Image (cartoon, rainbow, N blue to C red):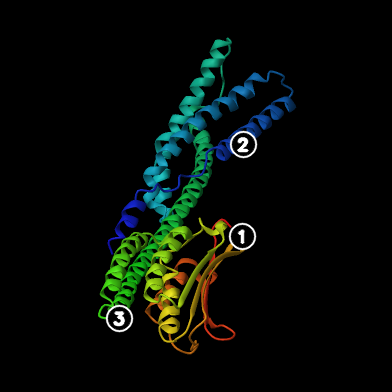
Amino acid sequence: MMSVVPLLTGSAQQPLPQPPRRAPLLAGWALFWLLMVTIAVQAHLQEGYTDLWRPLLWEGSSCAMATACAAFLWRWVPRADGHLAHPLRWFRLALLQLLWMAPLFVAAIYAVRHGVYALVGEVYRHPPWTQVLLHESLRFGLFYALFAAVVFGVRAHAALQAEGLRAERALTLAREAQLAQLAQQMQPHFLFNALNTIAEVVHADAAQAESLLLRLSALLRAATELTRRPLVPLADELALVEGYAAIMRERFAGRLVLTIDADPATATVEVPSLCLQPLLENAFVHGVERCAGPAEVRVSARLVTPAELELQVRCNLGTVNLSAPDGVGLGTLRERLAAARGAAAWLVLDAQPGGGSVATLRWPVRGG
């Protein structure tokens, strides 16, 4: 389980998605106020006035103060993100800001208007202050509620995206942990079979047994490295196969021909670590070891399509019992394939015409 820990600790440091970009919101905001200014100017012209600076001042002052209030609200809302799951509570907190923001808004826009009018030597006339405060506060309240609803929608959408990504990462971590655990299970099974092979020759030929042990030691070092990674380049996997093949050639010297035929284009394709090992072991245990006579084992790798890799292990000896349950090696490999790629990755064991077996593994190439 040691190989699972770095996956969990490493991914926890990944940043969560940020809220949507502000450009669309700013564009919508500018369009809204352009529409408001246009309406005010047209109404002013229809009443027979030509001094356009007045409606521009009225709407411009409202726009400036409303933008300041909106900017404050946008900077404040992250504090209320913890209440996004409870909309009523979120809006209650947001509307509390209206109690002080509305009178400040009214005071600010009228201060600006009075100041500009005074600069041009005129007096800005308006209804009594109580009526102004009530009327403008109601208008600002409607505007504020609409803007708060938009902000809530944006923040809630961003929170849903973040939660979805967290769930996806959790699922990925669980899948990677499962793959790592299954890969670790392959190593003792492989070691057990390899030691059985050496035990069969240790009394008959001590020198050969010693040679096999040295090769096995080198092979186990390489296998240990591979099991720390759920996926490895096919070139690394084939290097491990070469080590295993060397042991088998020495053990069955004189009657075994083992060849590896891999398309160079497949060398960098990432495949499950130790995926060929159980296929080779199956060919030797159920074919080469049980049957006398010349044995031919062929390992091949090719791209069936740019997006699909095919790995095959063929043996000219033995029979295939399709109704028999999978052993540990093949059963674990099927679980790993299903966990990694679902139905897109599969393994089929079948009989060859004329005798022998063929194991075919299909693997989808990412980015193919």
Residues packed near mark 3 inside 10 Å, few (<14), some (14 to 19) or many (20 plus): few
- Residue 125 horizontal/vertical position (percent): 57, 21
Separation (CA) of disc 1 from disc 2? 51 Å
Nearer to me, 181 or 206: 206
Report which quarter residue 26 is drawn in.
top right
Nearer to me, 262 or 38: 262
Mark 3 = which residue? 200
- First in sequence, mark 1 or 2: give its number: 2
Residues packed near mark 1 inside 10 Å, few (<14), some (14 to 19) or many (20 plus): few
Residue at the spot x=27%, y=70% of the render?
Answer: 210
Q: Secondary structure under badge 3?
A: loop
Residue at the spot x=38%, y=46% of the render?
Answer: 80
Separation (CA) of disc 2 from disc 3? 86 Å
Q: Is residue 128 left or right of residue 248?
A: right
Mark 2 = which residue? 32
Nearer to me, 354 or 335: 354
